Image (cartoon, rainbow, N blue to C red):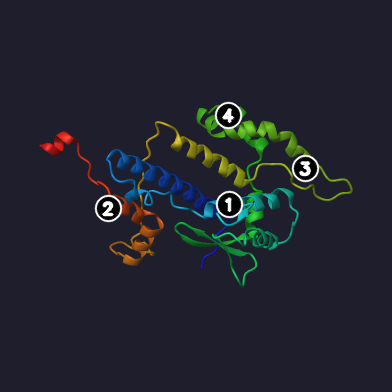
Amino acid sequence: DVEHGLEQLLINYCNERLQALFNAQLFAAEARDYEAEGLPQAIFATLCLTRDLPALPLLEGGSDGRWRTPGVFALVDDEARCRFNAGSATALRSRMDASLAGCAAYKACKGDAGSFAVAHFAGDVIYDSKAFVEANANAARAEILAFLGAATASPFLRAVLGAGGEGGRQEASALQRQQEPRPGGGRCRQLFGRTVIQAFRAELETLIRTLEAEGTQCHYVRCLKPNPSLQPMVFDAETMLRQCRYSGLLETVHIRQYGFPHRQPTAAFVE
């Protein structure tokens, strides 16, 4: 199996958050419609429950119902910012095994001390944690973002770099202290500075808040791959069915089965 890095984990985390938003909005809207139409609540109550996504508490931290975890992101941030185990390619995986072993979505891979799997809503994905710490520490320097945001004449770049520039002014002195050598020599522990995970989560949170805002009407387009090799005119039924199951489409069809999938105004129906 192909092993993925931190970048793919963040992409899949974004997909998890958007799937959670889709579930909440769809099922809540269906429940409101059925109540208004007078359907007995016993018919749709269990169908309209939000589907659990165990990968979210695993990544963000919290409780998955059985186990409370600090979360993968917190563990990676600790290693990237503090460098307690600098030079060790397997220290992060060891910490994850100790902290996350009871989480339903976490699976340690045998035979490779740096690999682990996450049970995403779309299926299990294997990641290689060996380069996680270094990749997470490679966020754009805050003082550079602050300089670009203040110096550029482009309104577009000022808008894009606005958040980073504000953060850069607040973090500049901390980043300078980070570069100072420790008493007695050696590298300073990286206790300050924004990590890649922190920057990504902040931007994603802004997007989710916008989509959840009152007055925002979301439209969802579900794209399915007809075959694993992406060849034209080839339809793989097993691949399509697996994607339908993982994406929650079958639950949506099940809900529609008990309601009114085609809604017409009363006047149009009478005619």
CA distance separating discs 4 and 1: 44 Å
> Which of the pair 162/30 is nearer the observer?
30
Residue holding disc 1: 63
> Residue 52: where, in percent of width, then height?
47, 53
Residue holding disc 3: 179
Q: Residue furthest bottom?
A: 111
Residue under the image location 59 percent in, 63 percent down: 116
The numbered mark, 3 or 4, whose residue comes first in the sequence reads: 4
Helix, strand or loop at mark 4: loop
The numbered mark, 2 or 4, whose residue comes first in the sequence reads: 4
Helix, strand or loop at mark 3: helix
Report the side of 80 relative to 213 (left or right): right
Q: Amino acid at mark 1?
A: Ser
> Residue 83: where, in percent of width, then height?
74, 52
Q: Are marks 4 and 1 in contact (CB under 8 Å)?
A: no
Helix, strand or loop at mark 1: strand
Residue holding disc 2: 257
Comparing labels 2 and 4, the label whose residue is closer to the camera: 2
CA distance separating discs 2 and 1: 33 Å
Report the side of 2 relative to 221 (left or right): right
The numbered mark, 2 or 3, whose residue comes first in the sequence reads: 3
Report the side of 3 relative to 211 (left or right): right
CA distance separating discs 3 and 4: 27 Å
Residue under the image location 48 percent in, 50 percent down: 16
Residue holding disc 4: 152
